[in-house]
Image (cartoon, helix red, strand yellow):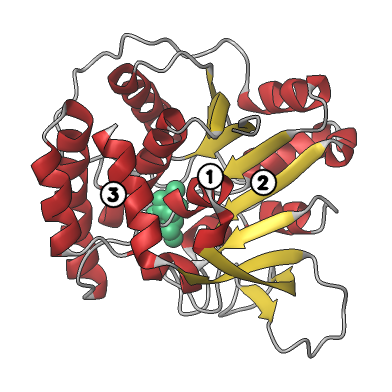
Amino acid sequence: MPNPKKIILDCDPGHDDAIAMILAASNPHIQLEAITTVAGNVEVEKTTLNALRMCDILGLDVPVAEGAAEPLVREREIAPTIHGKTGLDGPKFPNVPRKEVSDQHAVDLIVEKVMDSDGDLYLVPTGPLTNIALAIQKEPLITEKIKEIVVMGGGTFGNWTPTAEFNIYVDAEAAEIVFNSGVPVTMFGLDITHQTIATEEILKQISEIGNPVSNLVSELLAYFSTTYKEVFGFDGAPIHDACTVAYLIDETIFDFEKVRVDIETEGTYTYGTTCVDRLHVTGREPNVKFATELDYEGFWRLLVGALRA
Ligand code: BDR
Ligand code: CA
């Protein structure tokens, strides 16, 4: 087996962030170096608490560092309509996690880990891009050492406004910095993540596994599916964030196109839109590897397999 890929998961758990974490923690192709948290689905104190709770459940011994509480420029916006008040509504967790948060700020940890690396570290943001942008601003040299930034965000349509996806909308100024950083960016937008819906059949497969982690995921998905049905009229919940880790494990699950993506930071109706130039009308150099198609069976085989393991 090739050397595992070293990653920092920068997240805002979040039901699908938690599932991305499970996949990263359980797969031998991934070496989870750290978890960093950001305000997104809920306030950063809560996303940190949720990350610590997930580490307890998974027996994960990696640093968890708390990051930005606010976007770079705009007012904070959160998503309790989708993830509940706690950010991980559904299961019951012990009040106080056993694992403690790191003393280091997420941005310092990211800078330190990247600068100490051999240029082989992947950043995997599954929330707003505030921490990554702050790290680039603090130490621009990291852009020469980050292997790849694997983002869940954006798309050719929106889920927070008609044209903007939540993670990009919450901090479009940060997204602009990341997408223009010169670091290779691989993007899992709504076009691909909406292909991952956890159907009733998938929920049944997960509930039949019957170990503590699969039981937790069943409870998470019961809640998450309900909000997606109520808010969007979907047949179940898309597991957006897990696409990033699935790609790092087995990139043949996805098809990609190289495209130019620019971030709208001004528009009256379009703030936070990722302008994805799929027909190459701008004639500008592509800056993003954009996921277009998914092998649904392959994706779920990986996820269900992780829960069985
Ligand atoms: C993204 O927003 C959050 O609700 C999810 O965790 C995911 O990262 C989807 O738009
Ligand atoms: Ca997320």
Few, some or many C-alpha atoms within 10 Å of disc 3 (few <14, some 14-19, many ≥20)?
many
Does 294 appear above or below 71?
below
Quadrant including the C terminus: top left
Whether residue 86 is visible to the viewer of this picture, yes or no, is no
The circle on residue 83 is 3
Determine the CA span between mark 2 and mark 3: 23 Å
Of the numbered discs 2 and 3, the one sitting upstream in the chain is 2
Give the residue type that dot 3 points to: His
For label 1, the SS is helix
Task: Classify 184 as above or below 110.
Answer: below
For the residue marked with disc 2, what is the amino acid? Leu
Q: Position of residue 243 (x, y in %)?
A: 47, 54
* In the displayed structure image, the side of residue 33 where residue 178 appears, left or right: right
Q: Tell me which label, 1 or 3, sits earlier in the chain.
A: 3
Disc number lying in front (2 or 3): 3
Does residue 228 appear left or right of residue 130 in this picture? left
Mark found first going from the N terminus, 2 or 1? 2
> Element under label 3?
helix
The image quadrant of residue 88 is: top left
The answer to the question of whether label 2 and label 1 lie on touching residues, with beta carbons closer than 8 A, is no
- The CA distance from mark 2 to mark 1 is 32 Å
| Quadrant in the picture for the N terminus | top right
Q: CB of residue at label 3: within 8 Å of ligand 1?
A: yes
Residue sitting at x 43%, y 64%: 193
Q: Residue at x 38, y 48 (%)?
A: 302
- Mark 2 vs mark 1: in front: 1
Question: Label 1 belongs to which residue?
Answer: 249
